[in-house]
Image (tube, rainbow, N blue to C red):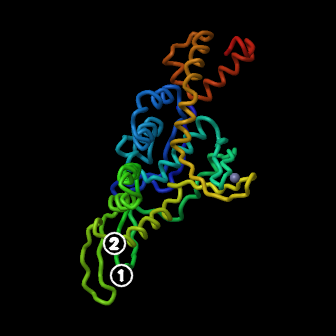
Amino acid sequence: MDGAVAIQLPNGFWEGGMRHAEAVLRPLNGCDEEFLFEEAAGRSTARRVTALLTRCTLRLGRLSPVSEAQIARLAAGDREALLLHLRRLTFGDRMPAVVSCPGDDCGQKLDLELSASSLLAPAPAETAESYETEVSSDGNSYRVRFRLPTGADQEAAAEAAGRGLQAGVRTLVGRCVTAASTAATHRSAVREVAARDLPETVVAGLSEAMARLDPQAEIELAVECPSCGSRFQALLDAASFLFEEVSGRRRDLYREVHTLALHYHWSEAEILGMPFRRRQRYLGLLREALGEEAAG
Ligand SMILES: [Zn+2]
């Protein structure tokens, strides 16, 4: 299909002990842009990401077509990687972003020149369907098996975070723990522990382990303010970035459809089915042929 490429997911989709790590992704077309700011507008960010990635992911390893349930089960870092690739394929690699300096009495707006490909974390050396770690708390040692947080886990955590940050972290960790057991360090008796009964320090340790294993899940930018010299970390959320960009083009989309239909007499459906860049190519040709004004 038009402009589709194969990319590698950092973690991959696991099913029946098999890892599906290659995804074939196509760029956004006009229908996807319209879908984002119309049909999907009322949904939470995680649900919009799932819906959009399901539309644009043509294949996941050996799986095709790809379902919403499969996309929802991808690790958070894989979804973030897909969004960055989608941004790059649709609008290009350059991502101009603006952040406000949090420095005292500064608030300077800083223009950042980001590139989608440089925000992609290097592939991890080893990946697994689930991981095991040992964390100690109050003289007890906890052995915990867990999987990486998915988009659905992140959404549940964000809802729980309304009751406080700690509740959010506990919800996230609780959903991802598949088995936990404990043994007092100097005794041999091991007993099973429910995820909700894990002590705070163990939950915090697991949360760190998850972040370490899936670095692509959170994109942190190191920024230095040229105005006041503050250094700070800014988080880049690939979904919000892409959604804002698409909704900012809403008026342009219909003007572009209008211009192309007027001159080429293609149907609305044909024009909306074109990837963004192909549409721009024809608009560029029209501008060359008719001059800026006539081609809008
Ligand atoms: Zn500053």
Residue for badge 2: 199
Indicate left or right for 214 with 130 as reference. right
> Which element is circle 2 on?
loop
Name the kind of residue labelled 1 in the image.
Answer: Asp
Q: Residue at x 70, y 56 (%)?
A: 224
Foreground pick, 29 / 231: 231
Q: CA distance from mark 2 to mark 1?
A: 9 Å
Foreground pick, 224 / 4: 224
Residue for badge 1: 138
- Position of residue 124 relative to residue 57, above or below, is below
Q: Determine the image quadrant of residue 289.
A: top right
Q: Residue at x 47, y 48 (%)?
A: 79
> Which element is circle 1 on?
loop
State the image coordinates of residue 4 (x, y, percent, origin top left).
Answer: 54, 37
Name the kind of residue labelled 2 in the image.
Answer: Pro
Which is nearer the N-term, disc 2 or disc 1? 1
Foreground pick, 262 / 108: 108
Mark 2 C-beta closer than 8 Å to ligand 1: no
Q: Quadrant of the C terminus?
A: top right
Indicate left or right for 133 with 236 as reference. left
Report if the CB atoms under discs 2 and 1 are less than 8 Å apart: yes
| Structural crowding at the residue carrying mark 1, measured as other residues with C-alpha within 10 Å and reported as few (<14), some (14–19) or many (≥20) | few
State the image coordinates of residue 147 (x, y, percent, origin top left).
Answer: 38, 61
- Position of residue 90 relative to residue 274, above or below, is below
